[in-house]
Amino acid sequence: MGDLPKDRLSTQPPFSYVGLDIFGPWSVTARRTRGGHSSSKRWAVLFSCMSTRAIHIELVESMDASSFINALRRFVSIRGPVKQFRSDCGTNFVGACKDLGISSTHCNSAKIQNFLTEHECTWVFNPPRASHMGGSWERLIGVTRRILDSMLMNISSRQLSHEVLSTLMAEVTAIVNSRPLIPVSTDPSFPSILTPATLLTQKVAVPAAPAGEFEESDLYRRQWRQVQHLSEVFWHQWKNQYLSTLQSRRKWCSKRPNLHIGDLVLLKDSQLQRNQWPVGVVTNTFASQDGNVRKVEVKIASGGECKTFLRPITGTVLLLPHAKDRTVEK
């Protein structure tokens, strides 16, 4: 495996070095008439910060250079100037490159070339069939695309408008940016986690979901309820698929280190509300007759109070071993 690119280790402000990809399309209602409605397609451009791992999603109405430049303008206007763009030449981007007039090494489109020159930024294209070189953003796009495609596949374009889709993409951005990156704790009794949203907004709190329950019947009601139902569906699927990438699930033929008191763990709970990631400290372990720990007691800090839960190890994800455990292993 090669070394990380320099832009992955950059200390520049967020979104100074960006990887991007285009995915979609989805059909939305463009105009309603007495005899029915006319539908059109929408694509999404996902921008991923190479250093903070945050994402930003913009919708585009077509795959031509003009629409793509508008998406770049909106992105740069919100996130600030970009020093370098990265993209790949995989099968999911070849069609976009062809319509935008972009080759794997340089830009053939005069409009896009002028845009890059004005903003003093460069564009680096990975070699063809080398999608692993863009793994830092392909991983996020892959999970996000699969969930959105499975959600929107069964929804009629009559129920999906541009406003609903754009608001849903904002909710998706908030959900993905609230994922835990690394535990950061100054007090072991009140552990906290670092998220891309924290690096972008400098705020620890996450956007709260609107009060109430949103069911499938909300798809036929007001637009804001449609968005919230779709956001809940995306949240549950994203959480399950993202957690599985943090904790490998193979047949238990080999021994794994036991959890110890003081380990920092992330709890998996299907009843959690959107954007909640409960992190706690293992306060007690319960070993079986064979000496393996399969149950642990975890202390969670929530709302200024500490609560203790008894959980199986399959319901936890180890984030940071206790310092003494790491010393013993060495």
Image (cartoon, grey):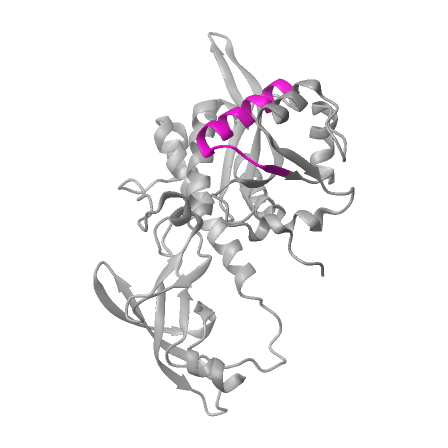
- Asked if residue 305 lies in the magenta stretch, the reply is no
Residue 194 vertical position relative to residue 255 in the rendered view, above or below: above
- Residue that protrudes farthest toward the bottom in the picture: 289
The residue shown at (49%, 45%) is 54
Query: What residue lies at 60% left-to-right and 46% top-to-bottom?
Result: 137
Decide: is 23 above or below 108.
below
Q: Evaluate whether residue 181 shows in this view.
A: yes
Could you tell me residue 93's position as x and y percent?
70, 35
From the top left corner, tell me how far across and down residue 189 is, in percent: 28, 71
Residue at 76 percent of width and 35 percent of height = 105
Q: Quadrant of residue 20?
A: top right
Relative vertical location of residue 9 with respect to residue 305 in this rendering, above or below: above
Quadrant of the image occupied by residue 256: bottom right
Residue most extreme to the top:
34
Q: Position of residue 273 (x, y in %)?
A: 34, 51
Where does the C terminus fall, quadrant-wise? bottom right
Residue 275 as seen in the image, left or right of residue 329: left
Principal SS element in the magenta part?
helix
Location of residue 105 with respect to 195 vertically, above or below:
above
- Left or right for 163, reference 131: left
Residue 153 in view here = no
Residue sticking out furthest to the left: 304
Comparing 37 with 97, the one in front is: 97
Q: Quadrant of the N terminus?
A: bottom right
Q: Residue, x 74% and y 38% (percent of image)?
A: 89
Tally of numbered tags = 0
Q: Which residues are magenta?
A: 65-85
Residue 79 among magenta residues: yes
Q: Position of residue 295 (x, y in %)?
A: 41, 79
